[in-house]
Image (cartoon, grey):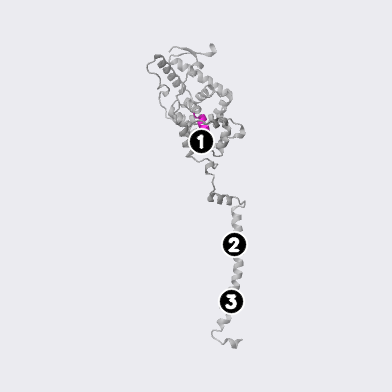
Amino acid sequence: MAIKPDDVKESDESLMVRVREGDHKAFASLVNRHSRMFYAAAFRMCGHQQEAEDIVQEAFIKLWKNPHSWDPENGAKFSTWFYRVVTNQALDHLRKRKPQAEVPETLSDGAPDALDQLEAGSMQADLERAIQSLPERQKAALNLCFYEGLSNKDAADILGVGVKALESLLMRAKTALRDEMARMGYEVKDKRYG
Amino acid sequence: MGEDMTIDALLQQRHVPEMRRHLSARIIDAAMKHPQAGAQTIEKSSFSFKGWWADFWDGFALPQPALVMSLVLLLGILAGTKFDFDLSDTDQDRPSYELVVSDGTDLEALL
């Protein structure tokens, strides 16, 4: 479904007000506008394309079924609120998922005959594997702050922790990643020591 | 391998595959199969007698027992009125004592 010019003018919050009144078109506009962004967020949490699509679909269906869980009165920005919905959906999904040793499917479409691309692909696969091996909350903190660009306060609110605790989660995530990548043979500088 | 980079530079190289082209349409279709909690959808907001009837009864502020008691009282009054009216009718229709007495005697002689 293509994005119409009308959809771009209206704010997310205004669309949500219409969704709360049962407006299908407003819901479709929100989905068209944000599905790619929240799919990426879900993928970064689970590392699997099909699962990420299911997570974002479930999150949007929850939004449609119960739009009153978003309260315009408390001034919540739609995207921040929906990051919380998607993150919780992804965390639920990860808890239910059976433990499995899987190679993320991010690199299956690379050029097969270019050595440098293969090396880059190998590094990206290792990076993805290292990130996916992080504890859930460290992974969520890293994704929300580093990739989704949320402020520490917003990310802390989404995870239900204080800002100091979030900073601690971030620091531990980066330390664990650096150690894991070093174990795989990559040399990663410690920023603290230049 | 052996590249020398900071952790932030490494994280920047993370890759997310494109979502499938029809994911948005799939989400919209799937959501439309679910009713919304606590809201009538715009498309379904047409008049229905069942809905109107429910709203009509919801409009009564009387609690159910008080409503039943009021109805019983009203029915009682109506039935009572009807019963009085019927009594006057049935007095005339019912076989009188005089008629019973008159069965074996001469009625005119008694009067």
Q: Which residue is mark 2?
A: B75
User: Please, which chain is the residue tagged with disc 1 on?
Assistant: A
Kindly state the secondary structure of the residue where label 2 is placed.
helix
Q: Secondary structure at mark 3?
A: helix
| Residue A156 lies in the magenta-colored region | no
* Real-space CA distance between mark 1 and mark 3, rounded to the nearest whole angstrom: 75 Å
> Is residue A104 something one can see in this rendering?
no
Return the x and y of residue A99 as percentages of the image width and height.
42, 27
Amino acid found under the numbered disc labelled 3: Gln
Along the viewing direction, whichever of A61 and B52 lies nearer the viewer: B52
- Identified by mark 2, the residue type is Leu
Q: Are marks 1 and 2 in contact (CB under 8 Å)?
A: no
Q: Are marks 1 and 3 on the same chain?
A: no
Please give the name of the residue rendered at 50% of the width and 28% of the height, measured from the top-left corner: A38
Q: What residue would you read off at disc 1?
A: A62
The answer, for residue B42, to whether it is visible in the render is: yes
List x then y, in percent, for residue B69: 60, 58
Question: At 48% across and 29% down in the image, what residue appears?
Answer: A90
Q: CA distance from mark 2 to mark 3?
A: 26 Å
Question: Residue B70 appears at what percent x and percent y?
Answer: 61, 58
Q: Nearer the viewer, residue A81 or B17?
A: B17
- Relative to A73, residue B73 above or below: below
State the residue position of label 3.
B92
What amino acid type is highlighted by mark number 1? Lys
Q: Are marks 1 and 3 in contact (CB under 8 Å)?
A: no
**Range of the magenta residues?**
A27-35
